[in-house]
Image (cartoon, grey):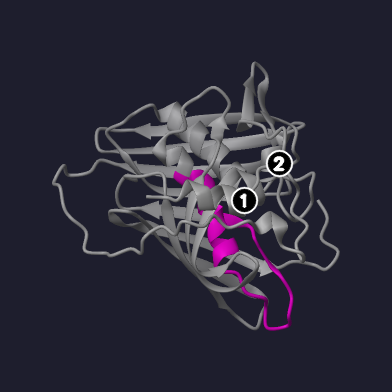
Amino acid sequence: MIDKINLETTYKKPKNVPPALFVEKASGVVATELTRGPWSHGVMHGGPICGLLGWAVETALNRTDLICTRLTVEILSGIGVTNLEVTSQVLKNGRKTAVVDGQIRENDKLVGRASSQWLAPSGINFETENRVPDIPAIRADPGSHPDMEYPRPGFNADAIDMRVIEGSTEEPGPGRIWIRLDCALINGQETSPFQRISTLADLGAAVGWENSYSGGTYINTDVTLQMIRKPEDEWVFFESHVEKTYQGIACCYSNIYDKKGLLGWVMQSQIEAPEDITF
């Protein structure tokens, strides 16, 4: 059981934190301050982008008998903390398989897109043999790190609850961290298990990050989440590391688990970010 006393003494939530990452409007969705990422305080973190597209494709398909075995999100440019248009299209809706795409536009410009594949499980129950560590009682507080300028409120510091086993999001990987989404994805709507894990998928790069061989910082341009079953719990355990090359290109690879065992994998293509990166 999580020790709430330790949680309260190690992490203090800022005042006036929005209850959700997005607010749905007739014209689309509006991103709240909780979506802000560390690259620029006016630009969204990749996690909310993945979560929003996960919400779009799951809502469009509207089926509970299938498992999303692959969600690939491409981040085409920095996406502002602003009004966004979100669309989706069911390309195939078969008895055993489905394919759904999603898109995000900002001021009529395509800034993010997703493709997803959904498969029907056999219905055979099985027990996994993967053992996962217990969830620590202490909640990490990345927003208090003296060398980081996380926006407050913002995604890394306030929208997610992280419990560290090994490493941290402020030191090079490999890392092993339990993570839970600590707010709603869409205000006033229940966040489904798939939407939660979609929102968390981009965090593998934070758990397992490393600098390039030249000392530069990697930034990921996509996120591919692959799952072998539906999540059983809101907590997700990331085991993340980076495979890098001397050409400035890398891949962050994460095994992901819930309390029951192995859920799947996350892969993120990475490139060295320019020193004067702007969005």
Asked whether 198 falls inside the magenta stretch, the response is: yes
Q: Amino acid at mark 2?
A: Pro
Residue tagged by mark 1? 11
* Dot 1 and dot 2 residues touching (CB under 8 Å): no
Where residue 19 appears, x then y in whole percent? Answer: 61, 30
Where residue 54 appears, x then y in whole percent? Answer: 50, 39
Left or right for 257, reference 23: left
Asked whether 33 falls inside the magenta stretch, the response is: no
Q: What is the residue that sits farthest to the right in this orientation? A: 276
Where residue 55 appears, x then y in whole percent? Answer: 50, 34
Instruction: Identify the magenta region.
Output: 197-222
Q: How far is mark 1 from mark 2, CA to CA?
A: 10 Å
Q: Nearer the viewer, residue 78 or 235?
A: 235
Whether residue 80 is visible to the viewer of this picture, yes or no, is yes
Q: What is the residue that sits farthest to the top in this orientation? A: 26
Q: Nearer the viewer, residue 42 or 88?
A: 42
Dot 1 lies on which element?
Answer: loop
Residue tagged by mark 2? 14
Q: Amino acid at mark 1?
A: Tyr
Whether residue 75 is visible to the viewer of this picture, yes or no, is no
Q: Which residue sits at x=48%, y=46%?
A: 4
Q: Residues within 10 Å of mark 1 (few under 14, many from 20)?
A: some
Q: Quadrant of residue 31?
A: top right
Task: Name the mark on residue 59.
Answer: none
Q: Which residue sits at x=35%, y=41%?
A: 118
